[in-house]
Structures are given as structure tokens and as C-alpha cells.
Image: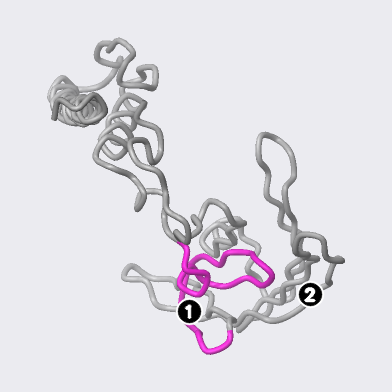
Amino acid sequence: MGGMGSGRAWYYGAKDLTEDYLALDIRRLNKAGVLKPGKSFGWSWLRNGEKIGSINISVSRDKVDLNYRSRSQGEDWDSLNYPVYLSWTECNYGGQRPWFLCPARGCGRRVAVLFGGKVYACRHCYQLAYPSQRENVCDRSSRRADKIRDRLGWEQGILNSTGGRPKGMHWKTYFRLRHEYDCYSDRSYAAIARFLWIKVGLY
């Protein structure tokens, strides 16, 4: 109960989700210190400890060259190699922030993340939705409640028992988080009750 999309079936033709695609995040590349002109490196994606994708990247000041293999279902592997141009903007407190310029034909949006289909392109070009855009009231409230449970060191899931104040946390912070948690969990319980009432014809 309360999982993604619970309480409604998703419709045919709905947008794919960002999490269904390999995400190449320039912020992670920059944080890893690999966006240095002349540098070449491999980048991999893991899921449950297993590699699910990889790409080779060569860096210059104004672009990165992506080199990887891709295929659609039932088709042969294609080797792809093309540039993605970069844009750098000044930060408020010094330094510069890098952005990808989406390489899809006719786009060129300045974005932080490209998603890997046949080619790497922005979320708008692939018409991708964020998982949160498919959440109903129950999903959204449960997710926010779980974030607070995680911060408080409690076991995930609003149906599990609550714990106490974590060691070292100020009481004022604890009471504020506890109040926010109660609001989100109550909202989630109400949505679950509404759903059940509708199912049995009582609402």
C-alpha cells in the first residue's frame, strides 16, 4: 500500500520515467574531477552491484566526446561517437559551473543531465517524467514521511513503529521533525482510507 502509483492504473502512452534511462550528470562528473581538457575516462552505471551500462568520454574545454555502443531490441550493436558541447556559467561565490548543451537536433538546451537512449539527450527531448510526477497524495506523503524517518534513524515505512530522538539532535529540531512527520503520515493514512472506502463503495 502506498507504493508508486498505487490507487490508479497508469495509462497507455504515459511518459517514460527519468529513472528508466541511464543518466549522465555533469555535476557528478565535475565533482569527480574528470572534466579536465585532454582527459579521457570510462564511466559506468551500477544497479544492485552489477554494471548496467558504460561509456567512454574524452574532454576538451568546450565539449566532451561520447563513445559507446547502443542497440534497440533485436537489432545489432551500433558504435556511436559524437560531441556534446559545454557551457560554463559563473557561480555567485567564484568558480564556474558546467552544463551540457543537449545534442539532439533542434534542441541545444542547457541542462545538467542527459539521458541515454539511442543518443544522449535532455529530459524534454525524450519527454520523460520525474517519478514524483506520478505520485498521488498517499505516495507523496509517504515519501516525505520516510525522508524524515531516515533522518531520525527510524525504520522506513509509516506502518512501522516510531522511535525516539537521535543522539546529538536538539530537542527543538526533533519536535519540529516529529510534527512534520505526523502531518505527512496522517495525510497518507487519510488517503489510504479514502482509497479503501472508494473500493468498497462507502465514499
User: Which span is picked out in magenta?
Assistant: 105-128
Residue linked to disc 2? 80
In the rendering, at what x and y percent does residue 18 appear?
A: 50, 56
Quadrant in the rendering for residue 196: top left
Residue pictured at 74% horizontal, 39% vertical:
50
Residue 173: image quadrant is top left
User: Can you give x and y, in whole percent of width and height, for residue 69 in the image?
Assistant: 80, 66
Vertical relation: 184 (above or below) 123: above
Mark 1 lies on residue: 88
The residue sitting at the right extreme is 76
Residue occupying the point 68% across, 81% down: 83
Q: Amino acid at mark 1?
A: Trp
**Residue drawn 77% across and 65% down?**
70
Residue 177 seen anywhere in this rendered image of the structure:
no
Q: How packed is label 1: few (under 14 Cα within 10 Å), some, or many (20 or more)?
A: some
Q: Position of residue 116 (x, y in %)?
A: 63, 64
Position of 171 compared to 100: left or right? left
